């Protein structure tokens, strides 16, 4: 876990700030007939590091679909590494928050953490 975190910290964003959603979570993405139809809740809309919005890859994609997602984003390895760090941070917060009250969300957070650590 420390290696993932340190790798994310070492991958400094040097590019210009870009628009980002800031809270790309499954609850903010509406799907219709198996396709993304709407993105909602722009309360954290900001300009900054695009890695923040890369975290959703852990919730929606695996295997070949994850690689396709990454190739469509055209992000560099440093952004991908920072995205792993963001994902780890968010999943650890969710695990701490939900471990006693929301067992499904807690289990999901564990899956994300394991996915990040095995990547």
Image (cartoon, rainbow, N blue to C red):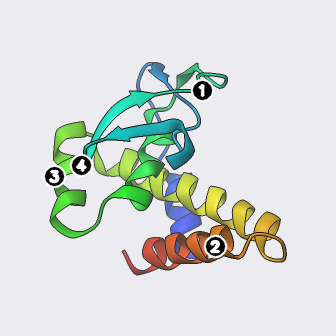
Say what secondary structure mark 1 lies in: loop
Say what secondary structure mark 3 lies in: helix
Distance between the alpha carbons at the discs numbered 2 and 4 = 27 Å
The circle on residue 115 is none
Distance between the alpha carbons at the discs numbered 4 and 1 = 23 Å
Circle 1/circle 2 CB separation < 8 Å:
no
Say what secondary structure mark 4 lies in: helix
Residue bearing the label numbered 2? 104
Distance between the alpha carbons at the discs numbered 3 and 1 = 26 Å
Circle 3/circle 4 CB separation < 8 Å:
yes
Quadrant location of the C terminus? bottom left
* Label whose residue precedes the other's in the sequence (4 or 1): 1
Which residue appears at 56% of the width and 71% of the height? 108
Q: Position of residue 48 (x, y in %)?
A: 54, 25
Quadrant location of the N terminus? bottom right
Which residue appears at 40% of the width and 28% of the height? 38
Place residue 90 in its image quadrant: bottom right
Distance between the alpha carbons at the discs numbered 3 and 4 = 5 Å
Distance between the alpha carbons at the discs numbered 3 and 2 = 28 Å
In the image, is residue 62 above or below residue 10? below
Q: Residues within 10 Å of mark 4 (few under 14, many from 20)?
A: some
Residue bearing the label numbered 1? 41
Q: Position of residue 49 (x, y in %)?
A: 50, 32
Instruction: Look at discs 3 and 1 and give the one toward the viewer.
Output: 1
């Amino acid at each position: 876990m420390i290696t993932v975190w340190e790798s994310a910290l070492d991958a400094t964003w040097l590019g210009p700030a870009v628009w980002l959603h800031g809270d790309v979570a499954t609850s903010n993405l509406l799907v219709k007939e198996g396709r993304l139809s709407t993105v909602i809740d722009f309360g954290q809309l900001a300009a900054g590091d695009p890695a923040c919005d890369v975290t959703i890859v852990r919730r929606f994609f695996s295997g070949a679909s994850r690689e396709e997602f990454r190739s469509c984003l055209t992000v560099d390895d440093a952004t991908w590494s920072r995205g792993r760090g963001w994902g780890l941070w968010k999943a650890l917060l969710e695990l701490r928050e939900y471990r006693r009250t929301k067992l499904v969300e807690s289990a999901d957070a564990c899956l994300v953490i394991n996915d990040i650590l095995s990547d």
